[in-house]
């Protein structure tokens, strides 16, 4: 056991003699600059892709909304046209009824000559 502790003490002495504050490589992570640059580039690309997707979705929503509103307008116009046609038919039917009744009355009111 003493043997293990002696190795530990030697290791501590080595670090103390250099001083961890003066040693630049002490507990410094190994950084691969190419990997870090590639990772940053990929993150930038991902952000850009997300922003483009959001813009595209917004455009699609606007187009769909505009298309729906135009369709509703057309449907409204069609329903108004149908209402006008039905009201014209009703007016025509009323006029036809009045004309038919008037013709009946006219034929009855004319004296008939028998020869």
Image (cartoon, rainbow, N blue to C red):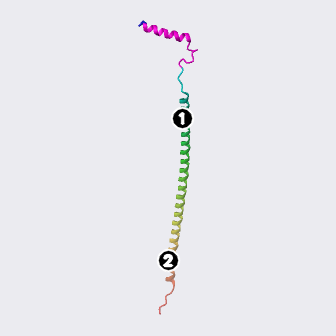
Q: Is residue 54 magenta?
A: no
Task: Name the residue located 56 percent from the left edge and 52 percent from the top edge.
Answer: 66
Write the start and end of the magenta stretch as one range: 3-27
Relative to 47, say whether 102 is above or below: below
Which numbered dot is residue 42?
Answer: 1
- Toward the bottom, the furthest residue is 115
Q: Is residue 23 magenta?
A: yes
Compared with 86, 26 (above or below) is above
- The residue drawn where x is 56% and y is 39% is 48
Mark 1 or mark 2: which is in front? 1
By secondary structure, the bulk of the magenta-drawn segment is best described as helix
Q: Nearer the viewer, residue 23 or 99?
A: 23
**Could you tell me which residue is drawn at 54 percent across and 63 percent down?**
81
Q: Position of residue 22 (x, y in %)?
A: 58, 14
Split into 4 quadrants, where in the image is the N terminus? top left
* Residue designated by label 2: 100
Vertical order, 33 against 104 (above or below): above
Q: Position of residue 47 (x, y in %)?
A: 55, 37
Residue at 50 percent across and 10 percent down: it is: 12
In-front residue for pair 34/8? 34
């Amino acid at each position: 056991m003493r043997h293990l502790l002696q190795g530990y003490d030697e290791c501590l002495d080595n670090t103390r003699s250099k001083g961890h504050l003066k040693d630049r490589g002490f507990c410094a992570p190994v950084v691969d600059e190419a990997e870090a640059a590639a990772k940053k580039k990929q993150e930038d690309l991902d952000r850009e892709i997300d922003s483009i997707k959001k813009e595209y979705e917004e455009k699609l929503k606007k187009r769909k909304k505009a298309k729906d509103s135009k369709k509703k307008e057309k449907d409204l116009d069609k329903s108004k046209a149908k209402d006008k046609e039905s009201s014209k038919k009703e007016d025509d039917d009323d006029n036809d009824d009045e004309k038919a009744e008037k013709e009946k009355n006219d034929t009855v009111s004319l004296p008939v000559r028998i020869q």
